[in-house]
Image (cartoon, grey):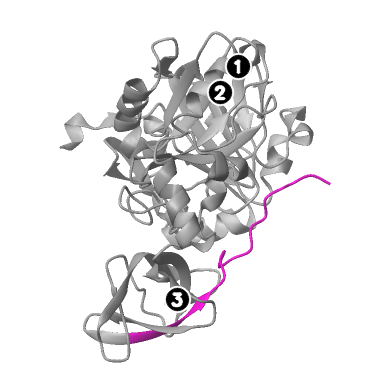
Amino acid sequence: MNNNQLIKTSLYDLHIEHNARMVSFAGYELPIQYKGIVAEHNHTREQVSLFDVSHMGQLIIKGKDFASTAKALEKIIPANIIDLQQGEMRYSVLLNENGGVIDDLIITRPTDKQATDGTIFIVVNGATKANDFKFMQANLTKEIKISFEEGKSLLALQGPKAASVLSRFSDIVEKLSFMQSDATSIKGIGCNISRSGYTGEDGFEISLNNKDAPKLASILLDEPEVEFAGLGARDSLRLEAGLCLYGHDMNEEIDPISASIIFAIGKHRRLEGGFIGDKKIQQIITNGAKQKRMGIIFDGRMPVREGAKLVDEQGNKIGYITSGTFSPILQKPIAMGYLPTEQAKIGTKTTAIVRNKQVNGEIVKMPFVANNYYRGN
């Protein structure tokens, strides 16, 4: 796909105005950086950054009422959906028959009139949203209507000062804890705001009409603490936070147990099943996963990137790296990858091969950098 075919988000002109370096990602032309990935990463950890994540898929799922929509979705999503309260959000996955992850997603029960008319919001990954839509269409009954919110943008305001900034424009901040959502208005601009994100920091994701997004972004960028950040910093931040990136740290060959995201499956649903892939998931839970995603901190300063082999003392491949970078906060190379479960214990030494050289590391508990989610007082 050449640049003439790439989709531009509603903030494209604003990105260019702020000297963004644009790249192709998930069919969109998006900013990878402005002032530099490390500078944007550190600014997010210390202040607050604004990310354009409008490539993500925003879906509306609607049945005759909330119960019917929730029950239908529970047949294809292993989360507890029926017990979602208004404004509550939940992380989960779509699975194939073998228990492999088709995509990960966020489910939200709205708070306004849509809370009672059967509407549920789902945000899916940009690169997989078309396939997710087809999968849902094929596996939900015709009574359940699925549609993309084509006219919507999605902005992410992330960092320890995000709440301070947003509170200057709306009282919604004091109403929301991590993984809660509500509708509000900022200077006359209607939007839905969730206290969530992909950086490990406190922050918010703002869904609003395309026509209003440049104005709201400019309002936020006018605040002294706020700067734009691109996809590069978003990736290094999520890796420090120990968060999976679909298509890298999990895919249709990897199940949620192996990926260390069993929390994406509701506790009672692990026993009761009733969703696509349930038999395989129950089998893996009973017998144990053969491999496990874990975090590794390596010696030296050379990043250990995706695709690097993990080897035993004889140099035989025993695992592989799925994401890796040099952590700006820890000032050490960090990575996530898979090893046989019996060799994936915290504190275990391991070795990667980078440019035909051995790099030693140690398995550590994730996240690499402690998260700062706001869970209420």
Q: Position of residue 323 (x, y in %)?
A: 37, 63
Tell me, yes or no, whether the two marked residues, 2 and 3, touch with CB atoms within 8 Å.
no
Above or below 105: residue 250: below
Q: Residue at x 73, y 28 (%)?
A: 170
Identify the element where label 3 is drawn.
helix
* Residue matched to label 3: 342
- Frontmost of labels 3 and 1 is 3
Q: Position of residue 213 (x, y in %)?
A: 50, 25
Query: Would you call the spot at circle 3 few (<14 residues within 10 Å), some (14-19), or many (20 or more)?
Result: few
Residue 20 sits in quarter: top left
Instruction: Please report the bounds of the magenta region as a residue range.
Output: 359-377
Q: Residue at x 30, y 25 (%)?
A: 134
Q: Is residue 115 left or right of residue 242?
A: right
Residue type at numbered disc 1: Phe
Q: Position of residue 156 (x, y in %)?
A: 54, 39
Residue type at numbered disc 2: Ala
Q: 204 or 61: nearer the eye?
A: 61
Q: 81 or 11: nearer the eye?
A: 81
Above or below 141: residue 55: below
Main SS, magenta region, reads loop
Q: 133 or 276: nearer the eye?
A: 276
Query: Would you call the spot at circle 1 few (<14 residues within 10 Å), some (14-19), or many (20 or more)?
Result: many
* Residue matched to label 1: 66
* Lower position in the chain sequence, tag 2 or tag 3: 2
Q: Which mark is residue 70?
A: 2
The Cα atoms of the two marked residues, 2 and 3, are separated by: 38 Å
Residue type at numbered disc 3: Glu
Considering the image in quadrants, where does the N terminus appear? top left
Identify the element where label 1 is drawn.
helix
